[in-house]
Image (cartoon, rainbow, N blue to C red):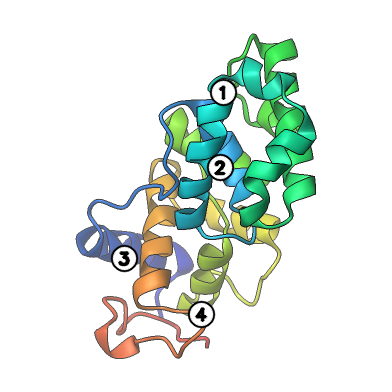
Amino acid sequence: MKSKKALALEVIERLKREYPHSDCTLDYNEAWKLLVSVRLAAQCTDARVNVVVQDLYAKFPTVEALASADVSEIEAIVKPCGLGHSKARDISLCMKALRDEYGGNVPDDFDKLLALPGVGRKSANLIMGDVFGKPAIVTDTHCIRLSNRIGLVDGIKEPKKVEMALWEIIPPEEGSDFCHRLVDHGRAVCTARTAPYCNKCCLNDICGKNI
């Protein structure tokens, strides 16, 4: 039986071949926009977020504009993403913090990101990996589900614990891309709402199949 580290390396290589161009599916061209989008993406699809933010940025095109906006104005636009009030409040507070503490820039420090309103470990890791190219492991629902099914972690469902377990076996420089590939694989093959399509899975012969 393979060690978890050996299994992880094999999974990484196979997913690289299967999904060579995996990337974040949230649209953004500035770091602060990814912060906004990832907050809106909680319990909402990335596709819907990508549509909704177009209206948000048309009205509030900068950190300063969004920081100065009334929360009710933000909420009116982001409502289709669900949880409109709490998301609008967090976005408003986060943009104010960027404006007042960081000159409108997004900090490239994990702990500083984590201290921003509405930013959790998943969001902070996404920013660190995608924006700044630093080691990151984004434990979203796909990452947690697939890591358990494959056998990279054993029955761990808490995001931070999964993240810590994966740091032990995933090379730091691979973490960010690996998590994006898990999302693609989780959407296409190792699905949540139907039985996974094990017959067409590139990991079929090495997967722990803990389903």
Q: Which residue is mark 2?
A: 37
Is residue 79 in view from this perspective?
yes
Disc 2 to disc 3, how far (Cα)? Answer: 32 Å
- Which disc is residue 17 wearing? none
Question: Which quarter shows the N terminus?
Answer: bottom left
Q: Bin the neighbour count of mark 4 within 10 Å (Cα to Cα): few under 14, some 14-19, many 20 and up.
A: few
Choose the circle earlier in sequence order: 4 or 3. Answer: 3
Q: Bin the neighbour count of mark 1 within 10 Å (Cα to Cα): few under 14, some 14-19, many 20 and up.
A: some
Disc 4 to disc 2, how far (Cα)? Answer: 23 Å
Is 128 on the left-hand or right-hand side of 198? Answer: right
Is residue 119 in view from this perspective?
no
Q: Amino acid at mark 4?
A: Ala
In the image, residue 200 lies at what x, y percent? 25, 84
Q: Amino acid at mark 3?
A: Glu
Choose the circle earlier in sequence order: 2 or 3. Answer: 3
Query: Given contact means CB atoms under 8 Å apart, are the residues at marks 1 and 3 in contact?
Result: no
Q: Which residue is mark 3?
A: 10
In the image, residue 62 lies at what x, y percent? 56, 19
- Which disc is residue 108 wearing? 1
Q: Amino acid at mark 2?
A: Ser
Residue toward you, 147 or 56: 56
Camera-side mark, 4 or 3: 4
Which residue shows up at 71% across the image and 64% down it?
158
Q: Which residue is mark 4?
A: 192
Camera-side mark, 1 or 3: 1
Camera-side mark, 1 or 4: 4
Choose the circle earlier in sequence order: 1 or 4. Answer: 1
Camera-side mark, 2 or 3: 2
Camera-side mark, 4 or 2: 2
